Amino acid sequence: MAETALRLRISGKVQNVWFRGWLVELASGAGLRGWVRNRSDGTVEALLIGPESHVQEVAGHCRSGPPAAVVGRVEAAPGHDDGSAGFRLRSTV
């Protein structure tokens, strides 16, 4: 099955609401590879890699996020496969 990569930038009340942990569980459960991290501007950034349908499904869930989040906007752009093994947290940038 062909894989795709999608880069997300999520804004709103998305830090300190367990967004990253939630996304690690969701993406891992969907069999995706990639990463998620906080950015110093208050957004969350993620790279989703995997089968297109799984990537799109997880990206769709990011529009609402975990219960404590208030997602204002999700910007999506094509990404590239960076060779990630599994889905993990990255340090804030």
Image (tube, helix red, strand yellow):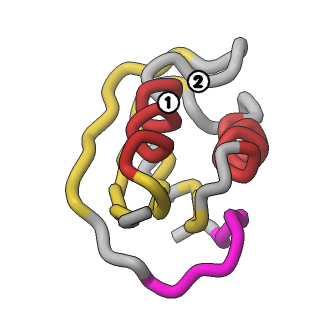
- Residue 80: which quarter of the image? bottom left
Nearer to the camera, 54 or 79: 54
Check contact, mark 1 vs mark 2: CB within 8 A.
yes
Q: In the picture, residue 43 is in which quadrant?
A: top left
**In the image, what residue type sits under mark 2?**
Gly
* Residue that appears at 35% across and 57% down: 7
Q: Position of residue 27 (x, y in %)?
A: 65, 47
Which residue appears farthest toward the bottom when viewing the image?
83
Was residue 87 drawn as part of the magenta stretch in this picture?
yes
Residue 83's x, y, as percent?
A: 52, 86
Q: In the image, what residue type sits under mark 1?
A: Cys
- Overall secondary structure of the magenta section: loop
Q: How many marks?
A: 2
Residue at 22% of width from left, 60% of height from top?
Answer: 78
Q: Which residues are magenta?
A: 82-91
Residue 26 versus residue 73 in the image, above or below? below
The answer to whether 50 is drawn above or below residue 44 in the figure is below
Q: Position of residue 48 (x, y in %)?
A: 47, 57
Q: CA distance from mark 1 to mark 2?
A: 5 Å
Under tag 2, what secondary structure?
A: loop
Question: Does 55 appear above or below 79?
Answer: above
**Was residue 73 drawn as part of the magenta stretch in this picture?**
no
Q: Residue at x 26, y 40 (%)?
A: 75
- Please tell me which residue is depicted at 51% across the width and 17% down the height of the picture: 64
Residue 8's label in the rendered image is: none
Residue carrying label 1: 62
- Picture coordinates of residue 21, whole percent (x, y): 77, 44
The residue carrying mark 2 is 65
In-image side of 10 versus 13 (left or right)? left
